[in-house]
């Protein structure tokens, strides 16, 4: 395991971890400022960041020792909703899609509606909490946060990343952004918001060939 010169000789400061934390920080920074970009730029940036995040996470080893303890939470409901709303605004009608894959691959059921914005926000929550705990400079906390993030990646957010990436690829290859679509503003979404209902209108009709 290669170490970076000048840093303590511990796994949390290895090259692979520093590379991973770097792409984590870049992804979080972009998602927190995505409202500054056009819809097309949001898609383009996600298509660059998400594959790099997946690759760096897959290459990440975890400490052999058992780590248990309290990890601080850095993403709260307002933070999550802000990221989800911003990505939803950017993607507009392209945010919603029919998800055909189920956790239990033996089930054959009708597809469910999924949203790229929610999947991206789920990823953001995981990696932002990791980044916050990593910045404590407490080696035990840092190692524990890395282990938790890697386990969560295996259990759920790795699959969400790939699902979102597949749909973003489709959008990139098929959507031609109009001039008025190329700029989006972060709008407020409250509990009565029906934007998701509007997005999925017609999706199931298409699936059923009605």
Image: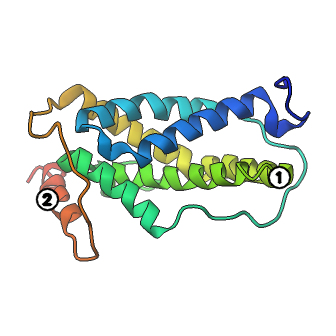
- Quadrant of image for the N terminus: top right
x and y percentages locating residue 95 in the rendered image:
26, 49
Task: Say which element carries label 1.
Answer: loop
When asked about the image quadrant of residue 61, the answer is: top right
Q: Nearer the viewer, residue 159 or 56?
A: 56
In-image side of 80 versus 7 (left or right): left
Q: Disc 2 or 1, which lies upstream in sequence?
A: 1
Q: Secondary structure at mark 2?
A: loop
Classify mark 2: residues with Cα within 10 Å, few (<14), some (14-19) or many (20+): few
Whether pointer 2 and pointer 1 mark residues with C-beta atoms closer than 8 Å, the reply is: no
Who is closer to the viewer here, 29 or 166? 29
Q: Nearer the viewer, mark 2 or mark 1?
A: 1
Q: Is residue 99 visible?
A: no
Which residue is painted at 68% across and 46% down in the image?
Answer: 150
Label 1 packing within 10 angstroms: few (<14), some (14-19), many (20+): few
Tell me what residue is drawn at x 67 percent, y 29 percent: 19
Residue 161, horizontal then vertical, whole percent: 47, 42
- Res 67 quadrant in image: bottom right
Residue denoted by label 2: 201
Q: Which mark is residue 64?
A: none
Name the residue that disc number 1 marks. 138
């Amino acid at each position: 395991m290669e170490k970076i010169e000048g840093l303590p000789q511990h796994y949390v400061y290895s090259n692979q971890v520093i590379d991973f934390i770097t792409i984590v920080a870049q992804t979080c920074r972009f998602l927190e400022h995505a409202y500054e970009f056009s819809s097309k730029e949001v898609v383009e940036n996600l298509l660059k960041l998400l594959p790099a995040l997946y690759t760096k996470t897959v290459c990440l080893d975890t400490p052999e020792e058992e780590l248990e303890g309290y990890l601080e939470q850095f993403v709260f409901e307002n933070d999550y909703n802000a990221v989800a709303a911003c990505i939803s605004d950017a993607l507009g009608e392209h945010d919603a899609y029919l998800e055909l894959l189920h956790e239990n691959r033996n089930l054959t059921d009708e597809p469910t509606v999924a949203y790229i914005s929610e999947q991206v926000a789920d990823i953001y929550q995981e990696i932002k909490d990791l980044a916050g705990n990593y910045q404590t400079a407490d080696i035990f906390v840092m190692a524990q946060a890395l282990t938790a993030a890697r386990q969560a990646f295996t259990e759920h957010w790795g699959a969400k990343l790939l699902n979102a990436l597949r749909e973003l690829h489709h959008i990139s290859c098929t959507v031609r952004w109009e001039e008025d679509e190329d700029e989006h503003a972060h709008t407020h979404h409250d509990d009565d918001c029906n934007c998701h209902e509007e997005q999925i209108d017609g999706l199931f009709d298409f699936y059923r060939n009605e």
